[in-house]
């Protein structure tokens, strides 16, 4: 029986009349103008890049969202996603269910973003996934990188609007009505998230309250390695999430490109700077030994897609999102350069570490 996951989404991409559904340009000049919708994403094979594919006959779109026009939650916006998750959890009366919110990264199309959303929801043990897709070009190279970098930054207002609606909803809900949600940002999606955090911090700071997210996973992050220490970057996330876990890998080609283009070292190439000064809720995991993965054609992912394709990393993230304590997670070891009080870890290439966790 084929697996199928209903992925709800918000996107500020332009609408196109082909199977891609949305393109690589902005929906409009207004940063808050975007479309929400949903589609079934079906697992057709075990191929890493196209194994999950959307069923276009199931596409549903809500009315476009515009700046300054307050609307009641629409069926596929993030508020409805959160409320539906809370209702489902209450009916099932289990504390293990959670939903995932994904902000995809550099070199992703709308279709590949949907694929990644369904793929990680299945691999991480999430029940549902909400995808916040900004208009990446879906190409690798210096020129596409620079373009994506600009688009990610400009998408801050869009991501901020989506997340602000969610935060308002969570802050006004009773404890019993709050769903378990985990935020996952990959690659340059961290840039869009950082830009959004600043808009929220400046315009609606009262919505930044404690522990609205169960956790935040920042994988192969294309932001400065001190971003979590900076109030004008990702520091607000430390209050919003009960725990923050960063995953990094040496030799990540996309982030090596970032390092060459920008004047700072990306967080996805190493530990957060001054990790020992950050809250103990922040931990970091070195994936360098297990970061090499391959696409459908057998070509390398340039050590940038381990968050969705490396069995060792999937095993680790699955336990993190399940709430397992950092020192109890199977398959990882204390960082060889020093564990920094249980905050720094690494994943060795060890097939036995996967045998007891159902990961093949």
Image: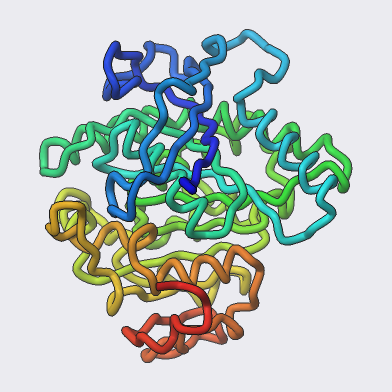
- Residue 66 occupies which quadrant of the picture? top right
Residue 259, relative to residue 360: is it above or below? above
In-image side of 350 versus 7 (left or right): left
Q: For the point 67% across and 61% down, which residue is it?
A: 242
Q: Is residue 194 visible?
A: no
* Position of residue 24 measured from the top left corner of the image (x, y, whole percent): 27, 24
Residue lying at the far front in this picture: please name it: 1
Q: For the point 72% across and 61% down, which residue is it?
A: 96
In-image side of 182 versus 344 (left or right): right
* Position of residue 347 measured from the top left corner of the image (x, y, whole percent): 39, 81
How has the structure been colored for display? Answer: rainbow
Q: Nearer the viewer, residue 169 or 265?
A: 169
Residue 194, relative to residue 271: is it above or below? above
Residue 36, relative to residue 176: is it above or below? above
Q: How many marks?
A: 0
Q: Nearer the viewer, residue 126 or 69?
A: 126
* Position of residue 106 measured from the top left corner of the image (x, y, whole percent): 28, 43
* Position of residue 359 measured from the top left corner of the image (x, y, whole percent): 45, 72
> In the rendered image, which quarter contains the C terminus?
bottom left
- Residue 167 occupies which quadrant of the picture? top right
């Amino acid at each position: 029986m084929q697996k199928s996951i209903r992925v709800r989404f918000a996107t500020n991409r332009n609408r196109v009349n082909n199977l891609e559904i949305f393109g690589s340009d902005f929906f409009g000049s207004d940063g808050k103008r975007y479309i929400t919708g949903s589609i079934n994403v079906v697992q057709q094979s075990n191929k890493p890049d196209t194994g999950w594919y959307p069923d276009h006959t199931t596409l549903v779109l809500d009315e476009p969202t515009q700046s300054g026009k307050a609307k009641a939650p629409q069926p596929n916006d993030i508020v409805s996603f959160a409320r539906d998750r809370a209702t489902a959890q209450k009916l099932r009366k289990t504390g293990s269910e959670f939903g995932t919110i994904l902000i995809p990264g550099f070199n992703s199309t709308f279709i590949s973003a949907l694929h990644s959303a369904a793929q990680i929801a299945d691999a991480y043990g999430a029940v549902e996934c909400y995808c916040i897709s900004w208009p990446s070009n879906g190409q690798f190279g210096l020129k596409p990188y620079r373009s994506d970098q600009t688009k990610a930054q400009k998408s801050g207002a869009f991501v901020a609007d989506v997340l602000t609606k969610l935060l308002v909803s969570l802050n006004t809900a009773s404890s019993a009505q709050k769903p378990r949600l985990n935020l996952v940002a990959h690659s340059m999606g961290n840039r869009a998230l950082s830009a959004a955090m600043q808009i929220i911090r400046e315009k609606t700071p009262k919505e930044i309250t404690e522990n609205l997210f169960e956790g935040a996973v920042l994988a192969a992050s294309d932001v400065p390695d001190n971003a979590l220490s900076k109030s004008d970057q990702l520091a607000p996330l430390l209050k919003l999430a009960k725990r923050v876990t960063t995953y990094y890998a040496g030799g990540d080609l996309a982030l090596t490109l970032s390092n060459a283009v920008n004047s700072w070292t990306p967080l996805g190439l190493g530990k957060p700077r001054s990790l020992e000064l950050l809250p103990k809720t922040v931990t970091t995991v070195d994936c360098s030994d297990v970061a090499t993965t391959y696409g459908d054609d057998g070509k390398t992912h340039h050590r940038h897609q381990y968050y969705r394709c490396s069995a060792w990393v999937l095993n680790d993230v699955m336990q993190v999102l399940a709430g397992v304590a950092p020192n109890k997670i199977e398959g990882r070891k204390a960082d060889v350069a020093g564990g920094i009080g249980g905050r720094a870890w690494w994943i060795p290439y060890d097939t036995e570490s996967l045998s007891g966790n159902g990961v093949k």
